[in-house]
Amino acid sequence: MIGDRAQLTAGYVARHLPPGSKVGLEIARLDIAQDFLLAHLAAEGVFDLVTFKGGTALRKLVAGGQGRFSTDIDLAAQPDAEADRRALTDLVAAQCTTTLGPFQYVARPQRDRYTVQVTTALGPVEQTIKLEIGPPCWLPPEPRAFIPHLTQQRYGFLLPALPCMRLEEILAEKVARLMRQSTARDAYDLVWIARTSPWSQFDRPLVRRLAVLKVWADNNGLGTIWRPALHPQAFDATRWLGPRGSSWDDEQIGLLAQPAPPLAELGADLSRYYGWLANLDEEEAHWARVDPRDRASVLAALQSLPGERLARLPLY
């Protein structure tokens, strides 16, 4: 059983934080609890049905202790499991009400997602884990191992490799979200990747194309699989050519990143590292207008992406 041989102490939890960090111990406890829960979900076969994605996937499988903390677990349905995503979400949530070593987890429904409350004798955990399952990845997932950390030696089990959304697609989803709202956590992740080797060598033209297509899908939807986002915007290339000023709406960055960057500096870095997003080719410039009449050409582009994962899904 995951966690039965755990030898965690309050001292080891404290060492999970970067030296001199002002991030609270509560976040360290939650971060470790996520590791236990992800290992449990893998052992129960859940990752045969879903793919890991988002900020927590970046922390666990890409950045490790160098990255920011992330409180949520975002998953993408595998194409074969997409038909009833609500039932899939319920199935995964049922596995999240459990006890694993020093951690107790209770999953509760909240609209179209679940929240998972964590309790532990190691100390208070006020933050909850938001558990959400989205539509399938557009590119084939990549298996990734957890980035090693000293605390993992006290877990009493080996963390598994997990199927992870390809890095370029994770970045594209963050770019698309930044078209709708200026979330500091997404900007922080984008900037960290862009200036950290070897991750900074990602495929920029692929990120740009994916981002433009995801913005189009946010505005127009794709069948019943990708529903339009709340308050969608067109792909505005000028948004990547200058600082965003005081428009940031995410106060969590101070809780999750150490040191927390000044938001003006973060906006300037985002423009400096991602100005190339404005260099749209002819097709991308056309899709950037988010005209619903372009559905046929958008679908052709999606179905010809590497891996052709979307070719059999009903996107009309």
Image (cartoon, rainbow, N blue to C red):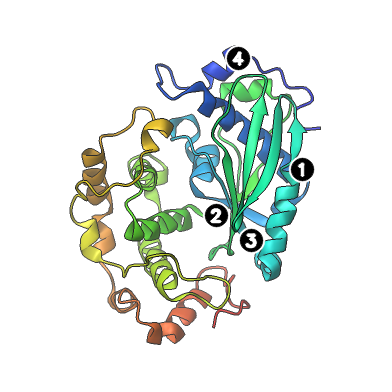
Q: How far is the residue under mark 1 from the one under mark 4? A: 26 Å
Single out the mark in the foreground, 3 or 2.
3
Residue drawn at (42%, 44%) of the image: 199
> In terms of image quadrants, where is residue 126?
top right
How many neighbours does mark 1 have within 10 angstroms: few (below 14), some (14-19), or many (20 or more)?
A: few
Circle 3: residue type? Ala
Report the disc number at residue 134: none
Residue at 23% across / 51% down in the picture?
A: 271
Is 305 displayed left or right of 284 in the figure?
right
Is residue 301 placed above or below 186 in the rendered structure? below
Q: Is residue 75 shown above or below 13?
A: below
| Residue underneath mark 1 | 43
Residue at label 2?
A: 165
The mark closer to the camera, 4 or 3, is 4
Residue sitting at x 63%, y 31%:
33
In the displayed structure image, the side of residue 275 where residue 71 appears, left or right: right
Can residue 185 be seen at all in this image of the molecule?
Answer: yes
Residue 48 visible within the image: no
From the image, state whether disc 4 or disc 2 is nearer to you: 4
Lower sequence index among marks 3 and 1: 1
Q: Which mark is residue 77?
A: 3
Task: Find the distance from the CA under tag 4 to the CA under tag 3.
Answer: 36 Å
Judged from the image, the secondary structure of the residue bearing numbered disc 1 is helix
Q: Residues within 10 Å of mark 4 (few under 14, many from 20)?
A: few
Name the secondary structure under disc 2: loop
For the residue carrying disc 3, how many other residues have a C-alpha within 10 Å: few (<14), some (14-19), or many (20+)? many
Give the residue at mark 4.
10
Along the polypeptide, which appears first: circle 4 or circle 2?
4
Question: Residue 55's spot in the image, x, y percent?
Answer: 48, 45
Side of 27 relative to 210 (left or right): right
Q: Amino acid at mark 2?
A: Met
